Image: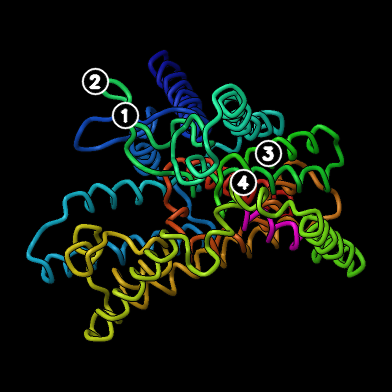
Amino acid sequence: MIASKILINYKISTIRVFFVIFLLYVSTTILTPKIDFGFVVVYPFEPFLILISIYLLIKKKIMLITNIEKSYFLFIFISMSTFFLGVINTDIVDTKAVLLIIKFFSFGFIISISYYFVKYMTESLFEKIIFIQLLFVIVYGSYVIYNFIFFPISMGDIIWGYSQEYRLIGFTGYGLSIDGIRAIGNTSVQTGIFVGLLFLLYLSHYVLLNKKKYLIFMIIAFVGELLTQSRSGLLIVFVGVLYIIFDKYNNIKLLKIFSSTVFLLTFAIYYMGLWEDISTFGTIGKIVSSEGYQDGSALQRLKYMSDAFEYISESPFGLIFGTGYGEGYTLILIGTPFLENLIFTALFQSGIIAFFVVLSIFYFMWHYARKLSNTKNHNIYSATLYGVKLFIPGFFIANSIGGNSLQTDFIVPFFFFIMGTTIYKQKKEKI
C-alpha cells in the first residue's frame, strides 16, 4: 500500500518535472546560445525533448489528433526513405543528415506533448510564455539600438553584415563550447520570421482582446522586426496586416485608406528628396538592392534553383523520388547544400510526393487555426490561433523563397507549442 502511494507520488512528480523542463525548452531556445559539442550543437534543454517523447510513448500518452502532426511525420518518413538514394547517387554517407533527421523527427512530438501537458496550462502561464519570447526583442534589441547610437558604422556595413551588435539575432547563430562562444551560422532571416510571428500574435491579441498592453507589445515587436533587417520577416508582417484587413474588418474602405497612405507617403518621400537616404536604411536598403538583381544573395538563390531544375530535367527519376535527403548529397550533385528554401529543397531531395506533403503541412496549420479561432467570445487561446492564421500565408511564402523556417530549431519549439496548446484548448471548448 505504501509502495503504491510512493509510486503514485513518483509518477506525479516525474510528470511535473518533465512539464517544467518542456516549458523551459519551448520558451528559452530563442534566448540562449546552443551547446557546441563539436560534432553536434543543441540547445540546453533540447535533449530532454527526446527523453520526454520516449517516456510518453512508453506510457502510450502520445496522441496525433490533427493532420498537422500526421503530415509532418509523413514528410520526415519520406525524407528518411530517400536518404539512401543520396548514398546511391554520391557514394558517400551524409552522417550530418542522420542527426538532422533525428532532430527534426523529435520536433513532431512537440505538438503532441503540448496536448498532454495542456491540463497543467493556464491562460496566465500561457501568456507569460509568449511574453518571454518578446524579451528577446526587448533585451537584444536594446543592445542593437545602443550600438547604433554610441558606436555608429556605415549603413552598408549594417545591411550586409551579420553582427549581433548591429542586427537583432541575439545568440541564435552562436554555439557555446569550452573554448567560448563562436558564430556557427547566419540566422537573420529566421529571426525576422520569428519576430514577425510575435508581431501578428500581439496584433491579434490587441484586436480581439482589446487590451492596450498588447498594442505596446505589438509596437515593440515591429521595432524588433526592423532591427532584424529581414525581408522575409517584413513580408510576413505585411501579408498578415493585409489579411486582417480583409478577414476581420472586411472593409474595402480601410484597405483604400491603407493603400492611399502608402502612396502619399511614398510621393512625399520622393518630392522631398528623401529617397536616397531612406533607401539605404536597414531592411528597406536590402529590398531596394534586390531591384535589378543588385542583391548578390538574390542572384545566388536563382542560380541554386536553376542548377537544381537543370539536374532534375536530366533525371526524371529524381523528380519523382528525389535525389536523396541530406545537404552533403545536394552539395555534391549541384554544388550547394541547400536551395535557400524549404519547399523546393523538399522537391529536389525527396521528390514530388514530399513536395505535396510539405504543402499540406502549411494548409493544415492554416485550416485548424482558421477553424478553431472562429468564435464569438475570444480568449488568449483563440486570439493566439487567430494570430497563427494571419502568420501562415506569409510563413509559407517565406519558406518558398528564403530558408527552412518550418524546421528552424529556435522557431519550431515555441511555434509548435502554441499550436498544440491552443488547438487542444479550443477543440475541448467546442465539444
In the image, which is nearer the foreground, mark 1 or mark 4? 4
Mark 2 surroundings: few (<14), some (14-19) or many (≥20) residues within 10 A: few
Mark 3 surroundings: few (<14), some (14-19) or many (≥20) residues within 10 A: some
- Residue 239: in magenta span: yes
Task: Give the residues drawn in magenta, as a range.
Answer: 234-244
Q: Which residue is mark 3?
A: 223
Q: Residue at x 60, y 23 (%)?
A: 146
Q: Residue furthest front?
A: 273
Q: Secondary structure at mark 3?
A: helix
Q: Which residue is mark 2?
A: 179
| Cα distance in 3D space between marks 4 and 3 | 14 Å
| Cα distance in 3D space between marks 4 and 2 | 36 Å
In the rendered image of this protein, does residue 370 appear above or below residue 135? below
Q: Which residue is mark 1?
A: 182
Amino acid tagged 4 = Phe
Whether residue 115 appears in this view of the structure is: no
Q: Position of residue 361 (x, y in %)?
A: 50, 64
Mark 4 surroundings: few (<14), some (14-19) or many (≥20) residues within 10 A: some
Amino acid tagged 2 = Asp
In the image, which is nearer the foreground, mark 4 or mark 3? 4
Q: Residue at x 62, y 58 (%)?
A: 235
| Cα distance in 3D space between marks 2 and 3 | 34 Å
In the image, which is nearer the foreground, mark 4 or mark 2? 4
Earlier sequence position, callout 4 versus callout 3: 3
Amino acid tagged 3 = Val
In the rendered structure, are the residues bearing label 2 and label 3 in contact, judged by CB atoms less than 8 Å apart? no
Q: Which residue is mark 4?
A: 281
Q: Position of residue 256 (x, y in %)?
A: 88, 67
